[in-house]
């Protein structure tokens, strides 16, 4: 028979673990690069760019458009990479609490 109290307890556990996992996301990061490493962006698990490095040789007036494109590419790649880490972290945080329900993605709750 379905034990509602047990299920509610599990939901509260999941909520607490999700909250803790969300707070811990500030501690994970990726470094993404473009242009063979001449532009690097560091992005944390809260999807915030926390550092941007540009090779000094790139900062020339005639290279402005290329530099802008490289920065955009580095940031967009980093955002994609951090999404993968977020999903992995959320999966670890909820492991063993709830059954593996196909289609249930706790990473998307953030």
Image (tube, rainbow, N blue to C red):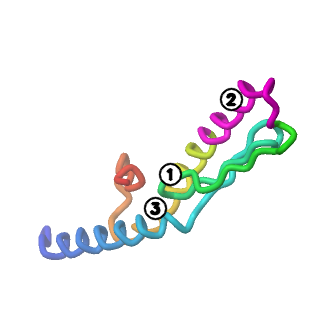
Tell me if residue 44 is in the magenta stretch: no
* Between discs 2 and 3, the one toward the N terminus: 2
Q: How dense is the environment of label 1, judged by Cα within 10 Å: few (below 14), some, or many (20 and up)?
A: some
Q: Which residues are magenta?
A: 59-76
Tell us which disc is closer to us: 1 or 3: 1
Q: Quadrant of the N terminus?
A: bottom left
Q: Which mark is residue 58?
A: none
Q: How dense is the environment of label 2, judged by Cα within 10 Å: few (below 14), some, or many (20 and up)?
A: few
Tell me if residue 60 is in the magenta stretch: yes
Point out the residue furthest to the right here: 57
Residue for badge 2: 69
Q: Is residue 58 left or right of residue 31?
A: right
Q: Is residue 72 left or right of residue 109?
A: right
Q: Which of the 4 quarters of the picture holds residue 106?
A: bottom left
Residue for badge 3: 91
| Residue 2, horizontal then vertical, whole percent | 14, 68
For image coordinates 36% across by 46% down, the residue present is 103
- Between marks 1 and 3, how big is the CA–CA gap? 18 Å
Residue for badge 1: 47
For image coordinates 36% across by 66% down, the residue present is 18
Q: Quadrant of the C terminus?
A: bottom left
For image coordinates 55% across by 68% down, the residue present is 27
């Amino acid at each position: 028979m379905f034990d509602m109290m047990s299920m509610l307890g599990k939901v509260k556990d999941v909520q607490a673990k999700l909250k803790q996992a969300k707070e811990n996301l500030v501690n994970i990061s990726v470094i993404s690069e473009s242009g063979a490493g001449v532009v690097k962006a560091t992005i944390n698990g809260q999807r915030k760019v926390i550092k941007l490095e540009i090779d000094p040789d790139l900062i020339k007036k005639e290279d402005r458009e290329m530099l802008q494109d490289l920065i955009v590419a580095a940031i967009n790649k980093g955002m994609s990479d951090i999404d993968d880490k977020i999903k992995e972290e959320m999966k670890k945080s909820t492991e063993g609490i709830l059954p593996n329900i196909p289609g249930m993605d706790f990473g998307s709750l953030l």
